[in-house]
Image (cartoon, helix red, strand yellow):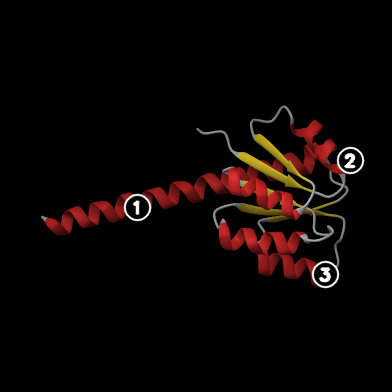
């Protein structure tokens, strides 16, 4: 199976460094961005399967980023990593960005983060497989209708 690509977005360099160290032995291609703008540039030039973003960032919030990703790249699985856990903001993120999971800071890498990333990749893989099977079924139906 193809190696999946994870894009991690946070304006705090120490968070990105920590994630880089913690995930370097995992079977993913890892990309890092320190802003929503840089994340969008990365998305334009790379196939990304999972995005994990902080909520509170200057210039473009994580919610703004995820709303754009939802429209432009609907197959990307979207996750939030944030210490900002105000209920109203959480609900907006979940409802408007269609978030797969919300991970709170501080996180436990082994117990929380790695497992959620693996779940997100599995979720992506299942959706791709479902879409492929649906296309194959449509092709079979079309072929049967011609006979």
**Residue at figure coordinates x 44%, y 51% from the top left:** 130
| Residue 79, image x, y percentages | 70, 53
Residue that numbered label 2 is attached to: 14
Secondary structure under tag 2 reads helix
Residue contact at pointers 2 and 1, CB within 8 angstroms: no
| Residue 2, image x, y percentages | 52, 34
> How far is disc 2 from disc 1 in space, using C-alphas?
44 Å
Q: Nearer the viewer, mark 2 or mark 1?
A: 2
Badge 2 or badge 1: first in the primary sequence: 2
Relative horizontal placement of residue 15, taking residue 71 as reference (left or right): right
Relative horizontal placement of residue 22, taking residue 78 as reference (left or right): right
Badge 2 or badge 3: first in the primary sequence: 2
> How far is disc 3 from disc 1 in space, using C-alphas?
40 Å
Looking at this view, name the residue that lies furthest to the top: 25
Q: Nearer the viewer, residue 55 or 137?
A: 55
Q: How many marks?
A: 3
**Residue at figure coordinates x 56%, y 56% from the top left:** 73
**Residue at figure coordinates x 60%, y 49% from the top left:** 44
Secondary structure under tag 3 reads helix
Residue 87's disc is 3
Residue 135's disc is 1
Residue 85 in the image: above or below residue 104: below
Q: Nearer the viewer, mark 3 or mark 1?
A: 1
């Amino acid at each position: 199976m193809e190696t999946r690509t994870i894009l991690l977005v946070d304006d705090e360099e120490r968070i990105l460094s920590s994630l880089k160290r913690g995930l370097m032995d995992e079977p993913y291609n890892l990309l890092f961005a320190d802003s929503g703008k840089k994340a969008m540039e990365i998305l334009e030039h790379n196939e990304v399967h999972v995005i994990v973003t902080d909520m509170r960032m200057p210039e473009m919030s994580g919610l703004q980023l995820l709303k754009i990703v939802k429209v432009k790249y609907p197959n990307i699985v979207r996750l939030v990593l944030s210490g900002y856990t105000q209920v109203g903001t959480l609900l907006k993120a979940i409802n408007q960005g269609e978030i797969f999971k919300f991970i709170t800071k501080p996180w436990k890498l082994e117990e929380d983060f790695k497992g959620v990333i693996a779940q997100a990749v599995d979720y992506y893989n299942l959706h791709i497989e479902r879409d492929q099977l649906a296309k194959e079924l449509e092709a079979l139906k079309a072929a049967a209708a011609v006979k």
